[in-house]
Each structure stands twice: as structure tokens, then as C-alpha cells.
Amino acid sequence: MSVVASIDGHQATATVTVVAAANPSGLDRIVANPSSAPLVALVDGMAGSTWRSDTLITFVDEGLLDAFGPACAGAAPCGEVILFGATQEVGYIDHTSQAEAAVTASETDIGAVNVTARLKWSSSEDTVTFRSVRLRTETAWEPLNSPIKVPLTVWIAAAGGTLTGTSTADAECPPDGDLVACVVSKHLDVASELYAAALSGIVFGATVMIGDPTDIAFSLPLALGAGWKCPVEVRSQLDGIVASAGANPMVVFRKSSFNAFYVQGIRKYVGENPWPEEPPGFACPPDDNGVIIMVAWAPNDYATLRHELGHALGLLQPSAGHTIGLNGFDASNIMWSYDSPDVTAPRSQLSLGQAFRLSAHDSAWVNRAGLRAGRTKHCQESFQADGNLQVDVPCPRLGRQLVAPP
């Protein structure tokens, strides 16, 4: 069959051949709730005498893994299975999961309760399950949760101008209407579609507010050290936008809030010296004011919002979260620093390693805000010179891709 994929005005066709496979014995398997969409799993375990890390499996409903065997020795990992899907939260099961709930011989299931069985590959056939109800025959089970909904408020504080972007979606915004609001709506739609397609398990519930057109100016030190915060002058200028929209800044700026501001322009200074080029966007690290993203209206760059969302949600390491120059990434990655003509769809994808960190890393914004239903883990943060993680556990490599760049 042929599959046609389109994104932001670009389109490509691929041919997929589906072959009915035999059901061999001796192999472990993975099972999920019935779904019409393919799921993706990354699997760690000892197969024979070889440790396999981040083995990629795609399946619908049920899939075969490998003949993984016991590999728990001291502090060594026993195994892990991570599940990604377009309509669910990223889930995982590993050897650190909670102890299995007691199941009596008369029970056929233990109901839809939030209990997780440890994953310890055995020498026999194991079944790892992500679904609502756990059966007694399953080796390890994790409840399947709905996508994480981020309550994003978008403030439009820009007006006028002309369309300078390259997306075909611009044609749907008539120049004699509310041009800014229409284009911002398209930016939101594309960002939401891309984060869903990247299997991040995150969706955006957006509310749009209209304020007075405003230019934002602020100063930063030459080097941003650990723990740097948004300049105080940013908050005072954004207070004016919020008030002009009829809202109370004291209510809007809270630790759990997530705000994006489309402003007329952004002027950044280093000390008293202006930055050589006005940045198209800027994301402040989350603090007591919550998340603050600023996007300049003038460039009308469709990639800016989705790029700054990545920073705000937790893609901050290495190189402040930028992937330019990192092994395994190209300009199609959302966290690339600029739009490049070298790829068909610039800044339109996330790696599976990035998707996992946005959803399950304990320092990700959704977890600090208490939005994730499933468990979290602390990802390794030791990087080599080329930006690759030195080890594949406890989290997948940052550059682990669904499809490797050419």
C-alpha cells in the first residue's frame, strides 16, 4: 500500500508492504490496547549473550520482541520497555517498577488499578502489556494513560505587517482580515500536529487572548550560567500586555502557568550592546512566573513557536537544548537553531529520546507541574563532546530516532 505524508506544505509518498508473520514460540511479546495506529517501543534486554539497548519495535495491538533472558546482576539493569504512541502518554516498564500486586488463583484480572509489575526477563516467554486491565498471565504491566494536556495561553500583542513565511497555510489567512490571529492559529495547529506526530504524548489546549501591540526589550549577561532567570524587565512589559487584554497579571503569572506571547518585536541586549540580530523567539526558564515564551511577529516563522515550546517543556541539555552539531541530528529536528534549505521540512521532527524527556524525565515541565499520570525517572545528563549520551540507560539516547537522518 502507499502512504502519503504531508507537513507544512511538503509532501512525500512511501510504499509499505505488510507481510503476515508466523507466530514462533520462545519469543517475548508486547501487547497494548487495540488501536488503529501503529505503536513504537524501545526495548532493552539480554538476548543470548548480547545486551540490546533501545531496540526499536513497531506494532499494532501486539508485537513480537526477542528471546530476552535474565540479566539482573547487582546494579546492572534487568531490562526496560518504553512505549510511544500518537494518542497516549509515553509509558515505560523497567526493573525499578513497583512490586506486582497479589493475584489469587481465582482472579482473571486485577482491574484497572494503578499497579505496575517489575520487568525481569525470564528464560521462558514473557508478555509485557500496556493497557487498561492486567491479566494474570502477563509478566509486566503498565496502565495506558491519555496524552498530557498542556494548558497553553497565547497572547497576541502584535498587529499589521505582511505575510513573509513560506508555509502554504498562509494562503488560508486573508490579508484584509485579522491576519495576526489567523496566522497564530495556524502556528498552533502545526505545532500541535508535529508534537503528536513525534509521539511525545503531549497535546496543547490553547486559549487565545488579545492585547495591545508591544515591542519587548531586555538585557542578558554574556554567559548564562546554571539557574539563570528571566530578566525582571520582561515580566513588567508582559504585565502591560496582560492588563491591556483585561486580565490580572497576578493571576496569569503563576508557577503552573504556561504563556506564549506574540509580540511586535524582540530586542535583546548583552549588557548595553544590542544583539546583532533580533531573535525570532525566546523562552525563559520556568520559575515562579511559570513558563514564558516570546515570539516575534515580524519574521512570521512557523518553526519558532514549536522550537520555543521544546525549550519551555524541558529540552535544555546539551547546548541549551539546541541540536545543531550533535551527532544523529540534522536540520529537520525541531530544536535545530535555524531553518535550513538543506532539508525538505526544516525543524519539524523530534527524536524518540527527546520525546521521552519531554514526557517522562522528572525535570520536564509537565512533571514539575504535576500533569503526568505515569511514573517518571531521572535521565542521565553526561554528554560526550559530540553531544551523544555516554550511556543508553536509564533513558534512551537523546539522538535515538524513529527514522535516522540520511
Image (cartoon, grey):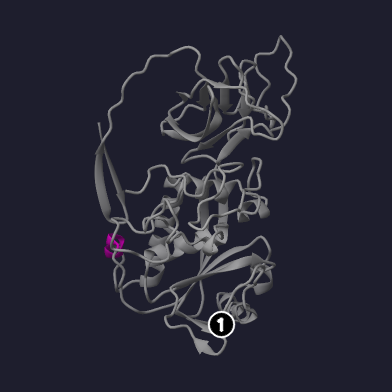
Asked if residue 120 is positioned above or below residue 262 in the image, the reply reads: above
Name above or below for residue 107 compared with residue 284: above
Q: Is residue 209 above or below residue 34?
A: below
Question: Is 59 left or right of 346, judged from the image as shown?
Answer: right
Q: Position of residue 24 (x, y in %)?
A: 44, 13
Q: Residue at x 51, y 89 (%)?
A: 273
Give residue 344's position: percent from left, percent from top.
28, 55
| Nearer to us in this view, 142 or 394 | 394
The answer to whether one can see residue 145 in this image is: no
Q: Position of residue 261 (x, y in %)?
A: 51, 71
Q: Residue at x 65, y 44 (%)?
A: 376
* Segment colored magenta: 167-171
Looking at the image, residue 388 sits to the left or right of residue 97; the answer is: left
Quadrant containing the N terminus is top left
**Which residue corresponds to mark 1?**
218
Residue 31 can be seen in this image: yes
Disc 1 packing (10 Å; few <14; some 14–19; many ≥20): some
Residue at image x 41%, y 34%?
A: 37
Say which element carries label 1.
strand
Residue 117, above or below 231: above
**What kind of secondary structure does the magenta stretch mostly adopt?**
helix
Q: Residue at x 46, y 59 (%)?
A: 323
> Where does residue 113 sit, x and y in percent of width and height?
69, 29
For residue 176, what is the image quadrant?
bottom left
Residue farthest bottom in this picture: 272
Which sits in the foreground, 219 or 236? 219
Q: Amino acid at mark 1?
A: Phe
